[in-house]
Each structure stands twice: as structure tokens, then as C-alpha cells.
Image (cartoon, helix red, strand yellow):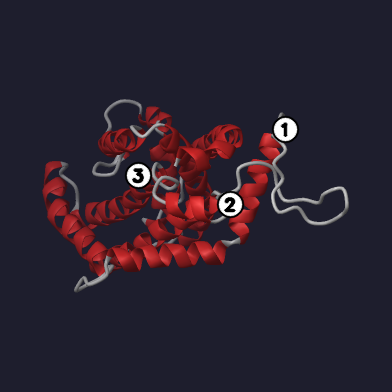
Amino acid sequence: MAETGGSPGTNGSGADCVLDLMPESGIGYLTQALADIGRGLAMWRLGWALGWVDIKLRYRGSLLGPLWLTFSTAVMVAAMGPIYGLLFHMDMRTYVPFLAVSLVLWGFVSGVANDGATIFTGAAGLIQAARLPFTLHALRALVRNSLILLHNVIVIVVVFALCGVVPAHLGGALPAVALWGIDSLALSLLLGVVGTRFRDIPPIVSSLMTIAFFVTPVLWEARLVTVDPRFLLFNPFYALLDIIRAPLLGAPAALSSWVAALAYSVLLWVGMLLLFARLRSRLAYWV
């Protein structure tokens, strides 16, 4: 069974303990949670292998395999680009690249959120069979969604080539990519804990992500808003999208978006650590 209590250590005779069953208390919860995260990240090779196998199993026997992900995204851009471009009276050479980047990035965000709510219940057999850090399962989901994102990047490259878009500030997106990785891990752990305790959470998360899709500038641009667009900063998805989308489209991200994105990231990590530290030892019994 997965580790449920304290960390491995040494007993009084100096020999290594197989499992320390001393109950956690106080700061010990946080210490063990941080140790779990550290051990999970140290096992990144196993996380990569598990995520890769997940993708292979999902598309086993399929004609195009994971390229179906690219194909479906390309069809969405080709179908929605002209329609929404006409509805919003947008220049197609500006709007279609915006839509392609937005849909690909949102697909990653939505995938991480929906996967996050089931990362522990979906790996119940492995959790009950092997003593592994819980963070490994969040890392596995992150690898899985990152591979899907890499497949869909092909759509962005093709659209940029057709529309003549040059990502002049591509280097500015690198810090945003790192922040996305850190936040995705925290979001997976946070939703994983809640989703394991309350089995109604996965469909709730799915419904909330559908609502967030329409109230976040994914299909529409923020400059179309007729009131003060700064209220969009209250939407955490907008700030996180803007810091990576703007450099890809050839403009530096706004400072206000970076400040908001960092603030939301701190809140996300604090909330995740408090919840994960307190409930980590019960996860193996809940799955």
C-alpha cells in the first residue's frame, strides 16, 4: 500500500525503517507533504514512462494514434475561425492565429483540471499495490497532458506559417511555460485530494471548466470588451493565458497579467500545500 504516515528513517539501533507509523502532527504534516513532492519529482523518469504509456494505451489500435488530437484541433480552428472572425468583424490573419493558440492552450488547462480530479482514484490499484509518492501520479497526469499539448503545437505552427505570424517575443514565453508547469502540478494535487474525498468533484470540475471557457478570452479577444478590461484580471485563467499567449502572438505580456498570474500561483500553492499536507495520509484509504 502507498505510504500513509511518516517518512522512512532510522530506528534506535541505526537500522533503516521500512515504514515509520508514528502519527503526524503539527508541522510534520507539511514536512511530509514537501518530502512527498520532492520524492515524486525525483522519480520523473517513472512519471514520464507512465504518462507515455497512458497515451499509447489510449490510442492503441487507432489509425492515426495521437495525431487524432492534432486533427481534431485543426478541424476546430478551421471551422470556428472563419465563423467567429466574421461575427467579431476581425481580420482573419489576426484572429485565426489567436484562436489557434487559445484553443491549444485551453485544451491543456482543461485537460489538467479534468485529469486532476481523478489522478488518485484512477490510479487506485497502483496506490494500493506499491509504496510510491502521491506526487508521482500528479506528475504522470502532467506528462500525459504535456504530450497532448506538444501534438497540438503542430496546429499553431501551420496556422502561423499560413498567416505569416512571426513570434517575435518567443523568449518571453519561456518563464510562462515554467510557471504553467509549476501551477499544473499544484492544481493536479489540489483537485486530486478533493476529488478523492468527494466523488462528485470530477463532474463539477468539468462543468466549471466549460463555464470558464466561455467567460475567458479564448474565442474572443479582451479588447472587444466595452467596459474596463482590467476586470478580466479577476479571472485567473485570463492572466495565465495572457502571459504565454501574448509572446507567441508577437507582443510582450502586460505587467499586470504577470503580477496577477504570480499572485494566483502563490494562492494556488498555499491552498494545495495546506490541503495536501493535512489529508495526504488518508488518500490511500479513500481511493
Q: Nearer the viewer, mark 3 or mark 1?
A: 1
Residue name at image x 72 percent, y 38 percent? 22
As rendered, which of 247 and 99 lies closer to the eye?
99
Quickly name the residue at label 1: 27
Residue name at image x 65 percent, y 41 percent? 5
Instruction: Measuring from the top left, give residue 186's x and y in whole percent.
Output: 52, 43
Q: State the image quarter where residue 69 is shown.
A: bottom left
**Considering only vertical position in the picture, is 34 above or below 201?**
below
Q: Nearer the viewer, mark 2 or mark 3?
A: 2
**Considering only vertical position in the picture, is 243 above or below 157?**
above
- How far apart are the two marked residues, 3 and 1, measured between alpha carbons? 31 Å
Circle number at residue 133: 2
Instruction: Measuring from the top left, give residue 31's x and y in whole percent.
Output: 70, 40
Q: Nearer the viewer, mark 2 or mark 1?
A: 2
Disc 2 residue crowd, few under 14, some 14–19, many 20+, Cα 10 Å: many
Disc 1 residue crowd, few under 14, some 14–19, many 20+, Cα 10 Å: few
- Looking at the rendered structure, the secondary structure element under dot 1 is helix
As rendered, which of 118 and 101 lies closer to the eye?
118
Residue name at image x 22 percent, y 72 percent? 61
- Looking at the rendered structure, the secondary structure element under dot 3 is helix
- Looking at the rendered structure, the secondary structure element under dot 2 is loop
- How far apart are the two marked residues, 2 and 1, measured between alpha carbons? 19 Å
**Considering only vertical position in the picture, is 34 above or below 228?**
below
